[in-house]
Image (cartoon, rainbow, N blue to C red):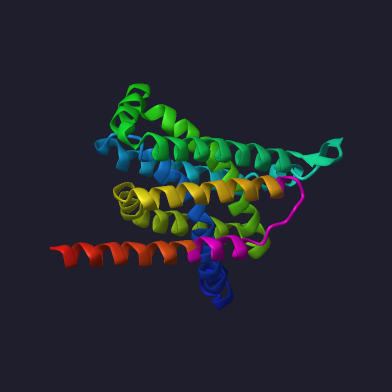
């Protein structure tokens, strides 16, 4: 452990892996924001924190279960192609994301006036139902995160430290990002569209089609840039009318 603390390579690996974990955590933050947005205002912060703590716990458990994780790539059955446990997790998570995002887009576009009623319905079901959904998707996102960590760094303490730092950064930004998305309906639709893209990417990965993450994040970044310009234009028009 002392050798790691005094090794420049170890610190460089920590910084690099933490950055990668934060980037990979974007998916987590978007999904977390959409789900907790259905909660009453006073429960949203708690929901975000519990969701991120669940993500942290899942990632650390997977890191300490690397031997089990290695077996996930073993073939379980063959149907047109070999299918492993890892493939099934990715496809299941992708299908769930597609269903959830499509349902939310429909409700936001076709019934925007029913937002308060939807929040009341979620409130009746309780915070637990939301946390369960977040926990299920945390497993999918955590697999991607942990596999990346194992491929980049050899030492388990560095992996755990990077995951801890990444989740701390996500906690720092989840609140402002979540509030911004909830207060801007057009941004909310854009975030839901990202979930559709992420869901489709997971399904493609699960069926054996590798999708380079930079392409996905570049498309998301370009969309955010266009939306930022639209919001700035709307703000300028408002100021001109005043």
Residue 80 vs residue 84, the one in the foreground: 80
Q: Is residue 8 above or below residue 226?
A: below
- Farthest residue, direction bottom: 8
Q: Which residues are magenta?
A: 205-222
Task: Give the main secondary structure, helix, strand or loop, of the magenta stretch.
Answer: helix
Figure quadrant of residue 90: top right
- Farthest residue, direction top: 124
The residue depicted at 55 percent of the width and 69 percent of the height is: 16
Q: Quadrant of the N terminus?
A: bottom right
Tell me where residue 189 appears, x and y as whole percent. Answer: 43, 48
Q: Does residue 96 show up magenta in the picture? A: no
The residue depicted at 31 percent of the width and 55 percent of the height is: 176
Q: Is residue 136 above or below residue 28?
A: above
The residue depicted at 32 percent of the width and 31 percent of the height is: 114
Tell me where residue 31 appears, x and y as whole percent. Answer: 47, 45
Side of 109 where 117 appears, left or right: left
- Farthest residue, direction front: 241
Tell me where residue 184 appears, x and y as whole percent. Answer: 32, 51
Q: Is residue 173 above or below residue 229?
A: above
Side of 75 where 235 appears, left or right: left
Q: How many marks?
A: 0
The residue depicted at 70 percent of the width and 50 percent of the height is: 205
Tell me where residue 3 appears, x and y as whole percent. Answer: 57, 70
Q: Quadrant of the C terminus?
A: bottom left
């Amino acid at each position: 452990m002392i050798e790691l603390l005094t090794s420049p390579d170890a610190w460089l690996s920590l910084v690099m892996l933490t950055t990668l974990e934060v980037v990979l955590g974007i998916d987590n933050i978007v999904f977390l924001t959409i789900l907790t947005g259905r909660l009453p205002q006073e429960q949203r912060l708690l929901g975000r924190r519990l969701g991120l703590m669940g993500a942290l716990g899942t990632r650390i458990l997977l890191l300490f279960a690397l031997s089990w994780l290695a077996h996930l790539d073993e073939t379980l059955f063959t149907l047109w192609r070999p299918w492993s446990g890892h493939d099934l997790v990715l496809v299941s998570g992708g299908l769930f994301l597609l269903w959830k995002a499509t349902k939310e887009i429909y409700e936001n576009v076709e019934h925007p006036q029913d937002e308060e009623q939807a929040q009341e319905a979620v409130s009746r079901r309780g915070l637990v139902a939301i946390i369960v959904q977040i926990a299920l998707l945390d497993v999918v996102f955590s697999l991607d995160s942990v596999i990346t960590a194992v491929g980049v760094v050899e030492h388990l303490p560095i992996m755990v430290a990077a995951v801890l730092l990444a989740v701390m950064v996500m906690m720092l930004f989840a609140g402002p990002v979540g509030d911004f998305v909830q207060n801007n309906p057009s941004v909310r639709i854009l975030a839901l569209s990202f979930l559709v893209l992420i869901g489709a990417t997971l399904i493609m990965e699960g069926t054996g089609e590798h999708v380079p993450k930079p392409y996905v994040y570049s498309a998301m970044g370009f969309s955010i840039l266009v939306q930022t310009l639209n919001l700035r234009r709307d703000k300028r028009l408002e100021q001109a009318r005043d």
